[in-house]
Amino acid sequence: MILVIDAINKDRFSHVLDEMFKLRARVFGDRLGWQVEVKDGRERDLFDDLNPAYAVGLDDEGNVVSCVRALQTTGPHMLADVFADILDGEPPLRSATLWESTRFCVDTRRLGRGRDRNSVSYATCELMIASLEAAKRAGVSDIVTVIDPVMDRVLKRSGNAPYDYVGKTADMGKVPALAALLDCTDERIDRIRAFGGVEGDVFISDDAALALPAIAGHVTPKTPLEQYCDEQIASATSEKERIAALRLKAALEDKIRSRMDQRA
């Protein structure tokens, strides 16, 4: 089950995000040995402060078992600002129909081998499908993803082989990195579904996720102000109204946070 978390619903799933950052620390910091910043057992960077969208895989209890981050390329993103060596002198990729996918990882400690719903293989395919379907629904035509050679082989084995690469392979600390391009097409999604044996809708709604045992105990009821802001976002009839409602919510959150910091 894949839960999509973005600027609209992130306040409802702070516990899930916290568990996601812990998973990223275990995978990228401990297992893969990437040069990432891990603090208090959590891996996060400045791009997590830019309101990205996350696809987070949950098991039947609501525990985090996988995750990936999506950023628009029209603003700051890792290929342009961190892995510029990969571009080999070429200008950064920037397009409203191109998203960057990073921090793709699966919890190999919690999941087993094989091909059933509780396996690493199934969780990997489910997360890939969710990433492509969510991007396609948002009008995105392509995804660029910074990966290592191991992940490149995983993509090829699962029917999700890149159709092209950007720049060159560059050093990323202990492992090299490369930038792969994936088209968000039904054909690609169908190939991954066939390989992983994934059928039906891979997404879980917010309300259903909040009811899962591992999440339910960490849910904080919304304040009337939060409820009002979310209603304004949900009822927006245009992208302009939606952006205005999101900015209003962010501004109010900043004021509340500032007052709390002053009191502390």
Image (cartoon, rainbow, N blue to C red):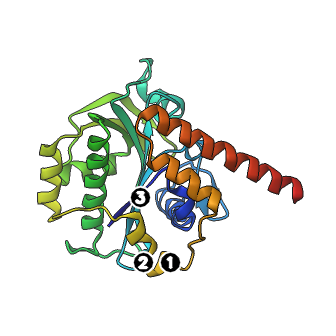
Q: How many marks?
A: 3
| Quarter-of-image position of residue 143 | top left
Residue 212's label in the rendered image is 2
Q: CA distance from mark 2 to mark 3?
A: 18 Å
Q: Residues within 10 Å of mark 1 (few under 14, many from 20)?
A: some
Q: Which mark is residue 216?
A: 1
Question: Residue 198, percent across and down?
Answer: 18, 64
Report crowding for label 3: few under 14, some 14 to 19, many 20 or more residues within 10 A (C-alpha).
Answer: many
The answer to whether residue 7 shows anywhere in this view is no
Q: Residues within 10 Å of mark 2 (few under 14, many from 20)?
A: some
Disc 2 or disc 3, which is closer to the eye?
Answer: 2
Name the kind of residue labelled 2 in the image: Leu
1 to the left or right of 6: left
Q: Of 68 and 62, which appears nearest the observer?
A: 62
- For badge 1, the amino acid type reads Ala
Say whether residue 206 is left or right of residue 199: right
User: Residue at left 25%, top 65%?
Assistant: 121
Q: Please give the label number shown on residue 67.
A: 3
Gap between marks 3 and 1 measured at Cα? 20 Å
Closer to the chain start, of discs 2 and 3, is 3
Q: Is residue 141 above or below residue 5?
A: above
Pointer 2 with pointer 3, Cβ within 8 A = no
Q: Where, by quadrant of the figure, is residue 185 drawn?
A: top left
Q: Which residue is painted at 48% across and 36% down in the image? A: 241
The amino acid on which the numbered mark 3 sits, given as a three-letter code, is Cys
Give the position of the C terminus as an image quadrant.
bottom right
Per the image, label 3 sits on a secondary structure element best described as strand
Give the Cα separation between the discs numbered 1 and 2: 6 Å
- As helix, strand or loop, the secondary structure at mark 1 comes to helix
Residue positioned 75% across, 52% down in the render: 256
Q: Quadrant of the N terminus?
A: bottom left
